[in-house]
Image: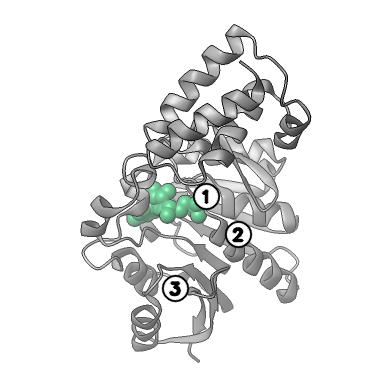
Amino acid sequence: MTVLEVIHRSTEFLTAKGVRSPRLQIELLLAHVLEVPRLKLYLDFDRVLKERELETLRELVRRRGAREPLQRIVGSTSFCGLEFTLDREVLIPRPESELLAERAWTLLEALGEASPCVLDFGTGSGCLGVTVAAHCPRARVYALDVSAAALAVARENAGRHGVLNQLEFWQGDGFGAVPAGMRFDVVLSNPPYIPTAEIATLEPEVRDHDPHLALDGGPDGLTVIRRLAAEAPPFLRPQGRLLLEFGDGQATAVQSHFEGVGWRIESIECDYHAKPRILVACRLG
Ligand SMILES: C[S@@+](CC[C@H](N)C(=O)[O-])C[C@H]1O[C@@H](n2cnc3c(N)ncnc32)[C@H](O)[C@@H]1O
């Protein structure tokens, strides 16, 4: 079977399974199996696949058809131009979170601190903390997660991108795991914020493959966000900022909660779809 025939057949199969962008998905899987850039396939449409290549591909297409996300099948994803290793213990980093990372390193540059301190609360794969460390070599980043398995992935990613010496890893439940007396210039978090009952309604790629610990924000989605609002203040330096990602439709509730418990909202920022998704806040006074 040729490259083009495989693309056509598998696109039909993935379409029938309800997979979005089926042609792109098969092209990415095929490029992964053949170890070539995706666009190279277009120059090789007539290439006949070896039986071994077809066998490997069949299994990957079967998994994608069963709605396992592409990033989990290939074991990595790109975030802010860096490749992050993934396993089933960590959330697949989302493109909108790149804006949060970029906001954080821009803020750190503007602060001009000699050695700014950042807390990446709920680090998961480490995508936020590692990217910030890579962009701001003066920064010390403390990566916190309740999941020891996630921290192992974050550590691997820090090593992969040469920033292990800038990071420290803390395991525990929220600020209880932060040593007393620590003060941060930036607390950065993409916490779990999906309302518990909504998880069952999500696409199978998310519902069945992202860890629920990374998704579940409690009955109204705001349980961890409220904890951040309540528990972060003693850990912020006077000019410190909290940078928080929240869900689509949560902006009003998040903003009024933070204002109600003594925060000043500096900005609410939008994602690539012009939806408000990031809060930048500091303490009043
Ligand atoms: C939405 S994921 C974000 C992962 C990563 N920062 C990203 O942006 O892709 C939330 C992370 O918070 C962690 N988490 C959930 N509850 C926590 C808690 N109480 N204390 C610390 N980490 C927590 C989860 O294990 C998960 O890794």
Marker disc for residue 234: 3
Image quadrant holding the N terminus, namely top right
Marker disc for residue 83: none
What is the quadrant of residue 266 in the picture?
Answer: bottom right
Q: In percent of the image, x 69 and y 69: which residue is there?
A: 108
Q: Position of residue 58 (x, y in %)?
A: 49, 19
Marks 1 and 2: in contact by CB < 8 Å? yes
Q: Amino acid at mark 1?
A: Pro
Disc 1 and disc 3: Cα gap in Å?
29 Å
Q: Amino acid at mark 3?
A: Pro
Q: Considering depth in this image, is 216 or 160 the residue closer to the camera? A: 216
Q: Position of residue 193 (x, y in %)?
A: 35, 62
Return the disc, 2 or 3, that comes first in the chain's sequence.
Answer: 2
Is residue 130 rendered to the left or right of residue 71? right
Q: Comparing marks 2 and 3, which lies closer to the viewer?
A: 2
Query: For the residue carrying disc 2, how many other residues have a C-alpha within 10 Å: few (<14), some (14-19), or many (20+)?
Result: some
Q: In percent of the image, x 24 and y 51: which residue is there?
A: 200
Return the disc, 1 or 3, that comes first in the chain's sequence.
Answer: 1
Disc 2 and disc 1: Cα gap in Å?
8 Å
Marker disc for residue 93: 1
Query: For the residue carrying disc 1, how many other residues have a C-alpha within 10 Å: few (<14), some (14-19), or many (20+)?
Result: many
Query: Looking at the image, is 56 positioned above or below residue 197?
Result: above
Q: Comparing marks 1 and 3, which lies closer to the viewer?
A: 1
Is residue 172 rendered to the left or right of residue 108? left
- Residue 87 shows up from this direction: no
Query: Looking at the image, is 185 positioned above or below residue 190?
Result: below
Cβ at disc 1 under 8 Å from ligand 1: yes
Q: In percent of the image, x 44 and y 73: which residue is there?
A: 234
- Residue 62 shows up from this direction: yes
